[in-house]
Image (cartoon, grey):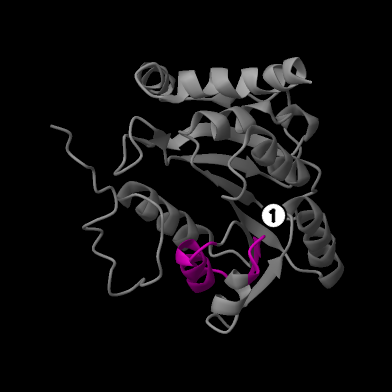
Amino acid sequence: MLTKQNISFPNFLEDEFTYEWHMSRNERYAFIKLLEKTRPKVAIEIGCFKGGSLEILSKFSEKVYSIDIDPKVKENLHEKFDNVDIRIGPSSELIPKILKEIDKKGEVLEFVLIDGEHTVNGVKNDITHFLNYIPKRNVHIVFHDSFNPLCRKGIKKANYNSSPYVHYVELDFISGVFNPGKLYRQMWGGLALVLLKPEKRRGSIKINECQKKIFNTVYWKSIHPLRDRLIFLKPLVKKLIK
C-alpha cells in the first residue's frame, strides 16, 4: 500500500503566511532564512502562481518585481502587497527590461527566485539573463524544483563561466522529494543556489551537487528516465510522420 507524503504540513507557519505555497517544509524554512539574512533592497520573482513565495518576498524585501504569464495573477494579487510590482508576460522579455529599469532607477538587486517555466530551455534562459548582469552587491539566485530532472538539466546547462561575478553554484542547497502526493514516482522540489558578487572571481566556477548520489539513485527508480526518452523521441516521430 502506497503512503501519500504530505511535504508541507505541519509547517508551523499557517497563521503567519496564509497564501498557497508549493514548497516543502525544509524549502520554506531555508527560503525564509535566506531572506531574513539578506533583507534584499530589491528582489525578482519568476513564477508567482498563488502568491505563497511572493508573500515571503514581500515581507523581507523593500521592493519585489514579480513575473508571471497568467493575467489572473495580477488580478488576484496586485492590491495585496504594497511593495510588489507584478508584471505579466514571458520572462524572456520581461527580465531584461526589469534589470535595465532597476539600474536606471538606481535600485539594488539582491535576491532572485526562479520558479517559472519548468523546462530545460526555460530554466536555462531565465538564469542566463542574470549571468549577463553586473551586480552592485551580492545577489542570491534561488531555483525551485532543482530536484526535477528537467529543471536540474536546465540549471546545469547555463554557462556560469561566462560571468566573472558568479562565485558559487550548488544544485542541492536543499534536497528535493520523491513521489510527493499524487505525483507518482516523480522528483520535485529542492532549492539550488547561485551567488553573484560585485567583485570578479579568479579561476573557473564549479557546479556543486552535494546530493548527486541521492539524485542519481532516485532518478533510476522514478518515472523520469522513460519520460526523458519520450521527450527525446517526440521530434524524431514528428519527422517520420511528415
Residue located 49% across and 60% down the image:
35
Q: Is residue 179 above or below residue 142?
A: above
In the rendered structure, the answer to whether residue 235 lies left or right of residue 180 reads: right
Q: In the structure shown, which secondary structural element does the residue marked by tag 1 occupy?
A: loop
Residue 213 visible within the image: yes
Tell me the amino acid under the disc marked 1.
Arg
Q: Is residue 145 above or below residue 64?
A: above
Badge 1 crowding class, 10 Å Cα cut-off, few under 14, some 14 to 19, many 20 or more, is some
Magenta extent: 49-71
Residue at image x 62%, y 33%?
155
Residue situated in front as seen by the camera: 7 or 3? 3
Q: Relative to 34, is 48 on the left or the right?
A: right
Task: Give the answer, above or below, for where 127 lies relative to 67.
Answer: above
The spot of residue 55 in percent (x, y) is 47, 70
Q: Residue at x 74, y 15 (%)?
A: 240
Quadrant position of residue 211: top left
Which residue was labeled with disc 1?
Answer: 137
